[in-house]
Image (spheres, rainbow, N blue to C red):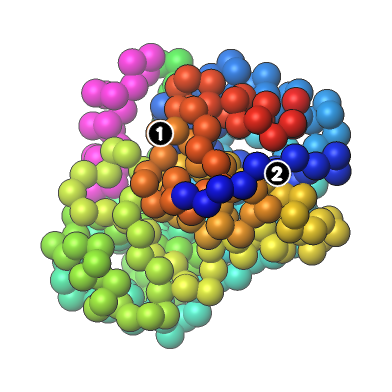
Amino acid sequence: MKNKDVKSKNKKVIFLDIDGTIYSEFGVIPESARVAIRMAREQGHSLFLNTGRNRGEIPGDIIELGFDGIVGSSGAYAEVAGNVIFNQHMEKTLLNKIYDFLFAHEIAFTAETNDKIYGTKENIEEQVRVFREFAKTHISDFEKNLDKISIFANLLMETENIYELEGVNKIIFYHSSFTIEELREKLGEEVMVISSTIGFMDGISGEIYSRDTNKATGMEAIMRHVGCVREDTIAFGDAGNDLEMLAFAGVGVAMGNGTSEAKAAADYVTGHVKEDGLYQGFAKFGLL
């Protein structure tokens, strides 16, 4: 972990991951996180989501917290005030290479666009099965969270020929017979392969996206648009797809529940998301 304690009188541009950073568990936002976000906005800071979720996967309770924009699909998409300012899809030749490999090795996968998730009939059915099992066993207030559960099911779309699909931002794979390290070696330097940040995916699962796209890419697009300098950015995250964001930000803050890699990439480690960690981080850097 780097060592930095930066406070500035300038208004900050804050980037927040969702799962494990705002959400303490599925569909649960700690009250202290709500208070921190509201107070930071009242102080005149700008707040942006920076998430691995595509635009369509972001639930209403997150949007309603109040954000100036969104970085989605692990940096492939960015919007400010509802207007899309950046969208870098995966290149078709690279996608075809990945599809060939995953089909050849019978690794289930889906392809994400800005607002939908596509896959073969078999892969969509398997993803629905996995998610239903997770919902039944891990979501205590199932009925209350039904809207957040159904948002994923509503995004899933069957496609007869995924090779013809346009506008793919990243690939989600699961039930892999290869380790993450083996997949990185076999797919080559053109892509990033990270472990899944979705807790309910069983077995070896994760994300595949272009090496030249990550959460820092989306941050830079936002910064150019709003005229922000790097020194006035603060990012909060907890997982493997947050590493570039945490390292790139003027101040990177890892959640106490974060991975060891996230903590190493950050300048500061705040408390656990379930123990007012987001509020503590905001207070530490004078955002409240």
Above-or-below relation of 232 to 283: below
Magenta region, residue range: 126-142
Q: Within 10 Å of the Cα at label 2, are there few (<14), some (14-19), or many (20+) other Cα atoms?
A: some
- The residue that disc 1 covers is 257
Q: In this view, does 238 lie to the left or right of 229?
A: left
Residue 2 appears at what percent x and percent y? 52, 51
Q: What amino acid does circle 2 point to?
A: Val
Q: Position of residue 9 (x, y in %)?
A: 85, 39
- Label 1 neighbourhood size at 10 Å, few (<14), some (14-19), many (20+)? many
Q: In which quadrant is the C terminus drawn? A: top right
- Mark in the foreground, 2 or 1: 2
Q: Is residue 21 visible?
A: yes
Side of 284 relative to 74 (left or right): right
Which residue matches tag 2?
A: 6
* Residue 44 percent across, percent down from the top left: 85, 34
Q: Residue at x 46, y 59 (%)?
A: 112
Element class at badge 1: loop
Q: Which of 219 and 53 is in front in this view?
A: 219
| Residue 48, quarter of the rendered image | top right
Q: Residue at point 69% right, 35% down?
A: 285
Instruction: Left or right? Give the position of 184 relative to 247.
Output: left
